[in-house]
Image (spheres, grey):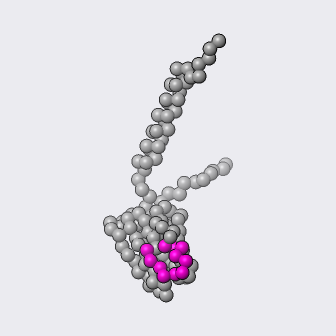
Amino acid sequence: MERKLLRPADLLLLLFALLLAGLLLWGQSQKPAQSCVAVIEEDGIEIRRIDLSTLTQAEEIPLGGAYGIVLLAEPGSISFQHSSCPDQTCVRTGKLTRAGQAAVCLPARISVRLEGGKQAADAMTG
């Protein structure tokens, strides 16, 4: 008795599952970008807010201080462009693009975090 690995009905079900997965991925890519607001704080005190969705071109934001901090705000992202702090962790953090992300320059006591956009729930109970 010979048994086939895949029957025609199995192939049809597999094709349907792949088509459904493709449609779901395409639908996710069509969502509009979230609007994020960059909150810049020094010593825990908010010094500036920037709505990244309204920017049309890159903007350097010099914060100065002992470490000569310069931020780079671009449409949809913000990053530490320059700091003369010893470890350069803030500069190596890279671009912040999604709500909830943050970067900190500890020696300069400067923090940048992104707020806004819709936060998807990890889980729901009830």
Nearest the viewer among 39 and 67 is 67
- Whether 117 is drawn above or below 111: the answer is above
Would you say residue 49 is visible in this rendering?
no
Where residue 39 sits: x, y (%)?
48, 72
- Whether 55 is drawn above or below 1: the answer is below
Residue numbers of the magenta segment? 81-91
Residue occupying image coordinates x 62% and y 51%: 123
Q: Residue furthest left?
A: 56
Nearest the viewer among 35 and 125 is 35
Q: Residue furthest top?
A: 1
Would you say residue 75 is visible in this rendering?
yes
Q: Is residue 3 left or right of residue 46?
A: right
Q: Quadrant of the N terminus?
A: top right
- Whether 82 is drawn above or below 24: the answer is below
Residue occupying image coordinates x 41% and y 53%: 32
Residue occupying image coordinates x 54% and y 81%: 86
Where residue 124 sits: x, y (%)?
63, 50
- Whether 113 is drawn above or below 63: the answer is above
Q: Residue furthest bottom?
A: 66
Residue occupying image coordinates x 60% and y 53%: 122
Where residue 22 sits: x, y (%)?
46, 39
Q: Residue furthest right?
A: 126
